Amino acid sequence: MGIRAQQKEKTRRTLIEAAFSQLCANRSFSNLSLREVAREAGIAPTSFYRHFRDMEELGLTLVDEGGLTLRQLMRQARQRIAGGGGVISTSVMTFMEFVENNPNIFRLLLRERSGTSAAFRQAVAREIQHFIAELTDYLEATSGAPREEAYIQAEAMVTIVFSAGADALDLSREECKALAERTVRQLRMIAIGAEVQNQRRRDGLI
């Protein structure tokens, strides 16, 4: 990559980080203006268009990056599990750490999941489906469950974890710890139910 290309990529990253930094509990992406993002990034507003067509393209990039960051963390969690540790407790702990350390990213995913822009809703839905698909692969490989049932289990788990993440944004550290413990218990109940279902199938009862 040449010097000019490197500089262009650096400025693009600066714009992405500038947009993320301005998101908070009281401010969603739809409230950001191009001028504000450009000013935070330290560039002229006209220079913005060298990197993104418009604010919507920037926002969709943020959604993609937020989802990718979360999936990478969960992959790391599965590697930690392979080295020893409970599957569910390690996964929940990793997810809650993500929410605590990246509240702006998680708020973006939550808000745009039900926002007014169809493009944003579809982008977030794709990220969640990627998340469910990776968990489905893992469950299918480790439990031997049929793909369809592994998917149903993964979908239920992702729904519960995302809901817990949304609640965690407004809780104290102690409350978050209690929430994480309840979430672990909920996911274990789902896992136990899935295992009973698998055993009944193996025994020819269903």
Image (spheres, rainbow, N blue to C red):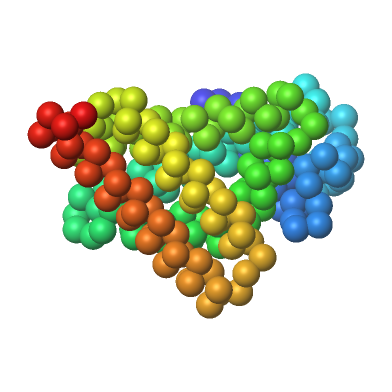
Q: Residue furthest front?
A: 205
Tell me if I can see residue 11 in this picture: no
Q: Residue furthest bottom?
A: 174
Left or right: residue 91 versus residue 179 is left
Residue 27 against residue 53 in the figure, above or below: below
Q: Which image quadrant for residue 19?
A: top right
Q: Residue at x 78, y 42 (%)?
A: 29
Residue 193 against residue 198 in the figure, above or below: below
Residue 138 against residue 106 in the figure, above or below: above
Q: Which image quadrant for residue 126?
A: top right
Quadrant where the image shows the C terminus? top left
The residue lying toward the viewer, choosing from 202 and 126, is 202
Left or right: residue 31 versus residue 204 is right
Q: Position of residue 6 (x, y in %)?
A: 59, 32
Residue 14 against residue 118 in the figure, above or below: below
The residue lying toward the viewer, choosing from 159 and 195, is 195
Q: Residue at x 56, y 55 (%)?
A: 165
Q: Position of residue 72 (x, y in %)?
A: 42, 42
Q: Residue at x 61, y 54 (%)?
A: 166
The residue lying toward the viewer, choosing from 160 and 173, is 160
Tell me if I can see residue 137 in this picture: yes
